[in-house]
């Protein structure tokens, strides 16, 4: 896969190019969010502001739900913390792959763009990534996220349901496209990913675990699977170098 | 909802979400040397995405049948190392095909 190769240092332009599929995917996801937000009583500019200020799908869906229900501010903060705490793990993981160009100050800006997919692509882009690459990678996903929200809020209500349904699976297709090719090459990734899926299924289908929110179930599954991997299959440096 | 209330909600939401991303990113500026800790953070991207995808993908569309079809298409294309965009579009088309079929043959 092209973005897995070990180019010396990918720049802003490569970042923008690699962001295109993410941006396309975000169009459909944020479109669904725009539709949902307006259906809950937000105006189009409010839906758009929520997207600009947060850039997180699950968190935003929960957030507008709390707004619509008139929930407390504590509930708002806790729900965002639980659903989005995975970004902290991703941020730490990204900090390990950032090269010397990624200064503390630039991290203050780059942090805004840490999403599942940007994280996934930046992680898979090579041994390390530069500030320019990451900033470039942020451009189209952010534009897609804002534009999709706007379009969803404005015209979503008139699009046939069958199209909205079909668009909404696209984001999961992207997740699969990030994980599967790497899992085929690296035993450790294959095993930990499989463990994460099994735990996630258990949390979802076994009645006793149903009290856990989706965000919590995801993070527990991911952390336990990665811990098992770290204990049983610690990566040695050659293998970790992403020299595919 | 009054405009002022909206902006208070928005601020709480946005600040929480931003700090969750920013604080760890700025604090962890040294490479982790420990092999196991390093492995943990190498695996995290893939375990997070995997747990987020399954089983949620099966409930992301109008019916579990169309979602399963879209998911299957995505798995096949990703297994063949197709790009993110191709896999995403394939999943959407697979879903759409079954959704269209279900309009004539409702399975539930």
Image: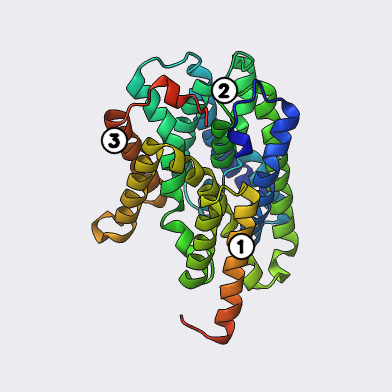
Q: How crowded is mark 3: few (under 14 residues within 10 Å), some or many (20 or more)?
A: some
Q: Quadrant of residue A164?
A: bottom right
Q: Give x and y (percent) for residue A153.
A: 70, 58
Task: Return the chain for callout 3.
Answer: A
| Residue under the point 31% across and 57% down | A210
The location of residue A59, given as percent across then percent down, is 52, 46
Compared with A63, A3 (above or below) is above
Most foreground residue, B72 or A110:
B72
In this view of the protein, can residue A64 be seen by the observer? Answer: no
Task: Read off the residue under disc 3.
Answer: A228
Element type where label 1 sits in the image: helix
Residue at (55, 80) in percent of width and height: B102
A44 vs A66, left or right, is: right
Q: Is residue A70 visible?
A: yes
**What's the distance in space between the residues labelled 2 and 1, CA to CA?**
32 Å
Mark 1 — residue? B92
x and y percent of residue A16 in the render? 73, 35
Confirm or deny contact between disc 2 and disc 3 (CB under 8 A): no
Element class at badge 3:
helix
Classed neighbour count for the residue bearing mark 2: other residues with Cα under 10 Å, few (<14), some (14–19), many (≥20): many
Residues at marks 2 and 1 touching, judged by CB atoms closer than 8 Å: no
- Residue A128 disc label: 2
Q: Which of marks 2 and 3 is nearer the N terminus?
A: 2
């Amino acid at each position: 896969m092209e973005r897995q190769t070990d180019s010396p240092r990918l720049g802003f332009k490569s970042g923008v190019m690699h962001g295109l599929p993410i941006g396309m995917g975000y169009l459909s996801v944020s479109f669904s969010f725009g539709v949902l937000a307006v259906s809950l009583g937000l105006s189009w500019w409010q839906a758009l502001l929520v997207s600009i200020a947060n850039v997180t799908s699950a968190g935003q869906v929960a957030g507008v739900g709390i707004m619509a229900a008139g929930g407390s501010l504590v509930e708002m903060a806790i729900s965002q913390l639980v659903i989005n705490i995975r970004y902290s793990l991703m941020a730490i993981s990204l900090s390990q792959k950032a090269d010397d160009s990624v200064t503390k100050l630039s991290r203050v800006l780059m942090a805004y763009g840490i999403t599942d997919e940007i994280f996934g692509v930046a992680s898979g882009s090579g041994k390390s990534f530069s500030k320019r690459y990451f900033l470039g990678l942020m451009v189209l996903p952010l534009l897609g996220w804002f534009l999709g929200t706007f379009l969803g809020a404005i015209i979503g209500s008139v699009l046939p349901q069958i199209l909205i349904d079909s668009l909404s699976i696209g984001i999961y297709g992207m997740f699969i496209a990030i994980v599967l090719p790497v899992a085929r090459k690296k035993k450790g990734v294959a095993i930990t990913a499989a463990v994460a899926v099994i735990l996630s299924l258990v949390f979802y289908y076994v009645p006793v675990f149903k009290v856990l929110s989706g965000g919590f179930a995801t993070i527990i599954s991911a952390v336990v699977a990665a811990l098992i991997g770290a204990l049983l299959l610690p990566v040695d440096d050659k293998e970790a170098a992403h020299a595919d | 909802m009054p405009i002022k209330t909206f902006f208070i909600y928005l601020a709480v939401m946005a600040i929480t979400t931003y700090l969750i991303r920013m604080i760890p990113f700025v604090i962890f500026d040294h490479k982790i040397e420990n092999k196991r800790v390093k492995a943990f953070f190498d695996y995290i991207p893939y375990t997070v995405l995997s747990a987020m995808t399954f089983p949620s993908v099966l409930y992301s569309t109008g019916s579990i049948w169309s979602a399963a079809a879209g998911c299957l298409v995505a798995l096949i294309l990703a297994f063949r190392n197709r790009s993110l965009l191709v896999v995403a579009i394939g999943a959407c088309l697979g879903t759409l095909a079954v959704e269209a079929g279900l309009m004539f043959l409702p399975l539930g």
